[in-house]
């Protein structure tokens, strides 16, 4: 093959690769939740476990008066949250978000302040099918405790990694208090617990510039602690 043609093909391939990375990063924060999906319900089979793209059940909470109860029979848990918060479920990513949304003054690309609808997340629930899905654990397959020790020890001053009992069933898990590395300095609470093969990661509010002026009457740390005390394992479908 002509060297000039080969060179052009290689250059085009590199540009295509860079564009694909940019496109993915630009759209990764706009993944549609189950509420935003259209079309028929579809089942997603991942590692032998079937997840159905259906909305969860929302009922009145029996744990805290005036709160709602999120019941997820696919991911096998329930949790209560404030009645005026939203819950969004992303089955493909096995993530559920709980929080508020409101219009906040934000500078646009031209530097002009404008109202934008911003979400402030109070709790993020991430579900892993098994230990091999944990970050960089596909080959080693360390158990949950060993994986936490490997990735988070030694701790910095003020950080915590310790056994933790929580939820309606006094479940044995782990509490990680880890300092956020970029932007607002704050310890982020993350609770890990395992039920069978499934691992649940419950993360507290992660502050950011866009939510620093978010209008709210809630103490997000207090709400997070109340929410995890209502956490309950339920029988999966």
Image: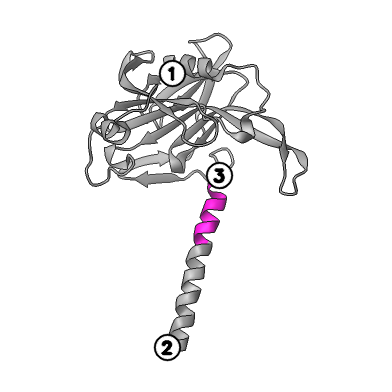
Of callouts 2 and 3, which one flags the residue occurring earlier in the amino acid sequence? Answer: 2
Q: CA distance from mark 3 to mark 1?
A: 25 Å
In the rendered image, which residue does mark 1 sit on? 228
Magenta stretch prevailing secondary structure: helix
Q: Position of residue 106 (x, y in %)?
A: 71, 37
Q: Is residue 33 above or below residue 179?
A: below
Please tell me in which quadrant of the rendered image residue 178 appears.
Answer: top left
Q: Is residue 26 magenta?
A: yes
CA neighbours of label 2 inside 10 A, class few (<14), some (14 to 19), many (20+): few
In the rendered image, which residue does mark 3 sit on? 29
Q: Could you tell whether 116 is left or right of 33 in the image?
A: right
Q: Position of residue 39 (x, y in %)?
A: 56, 47
CA neighbours of label 3 inside 10 A, class few (<14), some (14 to 19), many (20+): few
Q: Which residues are magenta?
A: 20-31
Question: Given this view, does label 2 or label 3 mark the residue nearer the observer?
Answer: 2
In the rendered image, which residue does mark 2 sit on? 3
**Residue at the image position 30 percent from the left and 30 percent from the top:** 154
Label 2 residue SS: helix
Please state which of residues 133 and 2 is positioned toward the viewer in this rendering: 2
Label 3 residue SS: helix
Q: CA distance from mark 1 to mark 2?
A: 62 Å
């Amino acid at each position: 093959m002509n060297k000039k043609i080969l060179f052009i093909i290689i250059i085009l391939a590199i540009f295509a690769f860079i564009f694909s990375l940019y496109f993915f990063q630009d759209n990764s924060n706009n993944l549609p939740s189950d509420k935003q999906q259209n079309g028929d319900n579809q089942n997603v089979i991942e590692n032998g476990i079937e997840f159905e793209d259906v909305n969860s059940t929302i009922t009145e909470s029996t744990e805290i008066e005036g709160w709602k109860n999120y019941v997820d029979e696919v991911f096998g848990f329930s949790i209560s949250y404030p009645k005026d918060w939203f819950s969004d479920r992303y089955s493909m990513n096995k993530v559920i978000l709980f929080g508020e949304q409101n219009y906040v003054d934000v500078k646009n690309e031209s530097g002009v302040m404008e109202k934008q609808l911003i979400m402030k997340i109070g709790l993020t629930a991430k579900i892993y099918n098994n230990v091999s899905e944990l970050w960089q654990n596909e080959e080693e397959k360390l158990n949950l405790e060993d994986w936490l020790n490997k990735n988070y020890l030694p701790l910095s001053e003020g950080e915590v990694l310790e056994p933790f009992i929580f939820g309606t069933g006094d479940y044995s898990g782990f509490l990680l208090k880890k300092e956020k590395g970029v932007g607002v300095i704050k310890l982020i609470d993350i609770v890990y617990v395992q039920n069978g093969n499934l691992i649940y990661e419950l993360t507290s509010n992660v502050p950011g510039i866009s939510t620093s002026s978010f209008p709210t009457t809630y103490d997000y740390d207090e709400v997070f602690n109340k929410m995890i005390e209502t956490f309950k394992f339920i029988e999966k479908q």
